[in-house]
Image (cartoon, helix red, strand yellow):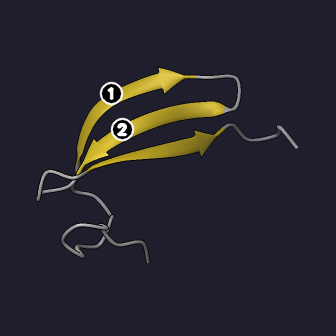
């Protein structure tokens, strides 16, 4: 399980989505933890490899 690098909370919903950016590899999603830490997540498109 991934945890926040700042407060140690589990990095599972609910978290706040700050922005989404579509790239050639997938969707880059920036999320914010309850403590305020920002985290990028790359959600890869299926079938690329």
Outermost front residue: 6
Q: Are marks 2 and 1 in contact (CB under 8 Å)?
A: yes
Q: Secondary structure at mark 1?
A: strand
Q: Which mark is residue 19?
A: 1
Q: Choose between 26 and 47: the one closer to the eye.
A: 26
Q: Position of residue 19 (x, y in %)?
A: 32, 27
Seen from the viewer's position, the closer of residues 24 and 38 is 38
The first of marks 2 and 1 along the sequence is 1
Q: Secondary structure at mark 2?
A: strand
- Compared to residue 33, the image places residue 29 above or below, namely above
Tell me which corner region of the image, top left, top right, bottom left or bottom right, holds residue 16. top left
Task: Say if 23 sits above or below 11 in the image.
Answer: above
The image position of residue 28, as x and y in percent, is 50, 34
Q: Is 46 displayed left or right of 49 in the figure?
A: left
Give how far apart the Cα atoms at labels 2 and 1 are: 5 Å
Which label belongs to residue 30?
Answer: 2
Identified at 12% across, 57% down, the residue is: 34
Q: Which mark is residue 11?
A: none
Q: Position of residue 26 (x, y in %)?
A: 63, 33
């Amino acid at each position: 399980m991934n945890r926040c690098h700042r407060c140690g909370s589990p990095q599972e919903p609910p978290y706040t989505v700050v922005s989404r950016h579509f790239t050639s590899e997938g969707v880059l999603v920036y999320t914010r933890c309850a403590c305020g830490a920002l985290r990028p997540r790359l959600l890869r498109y299926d079938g690329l490899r």
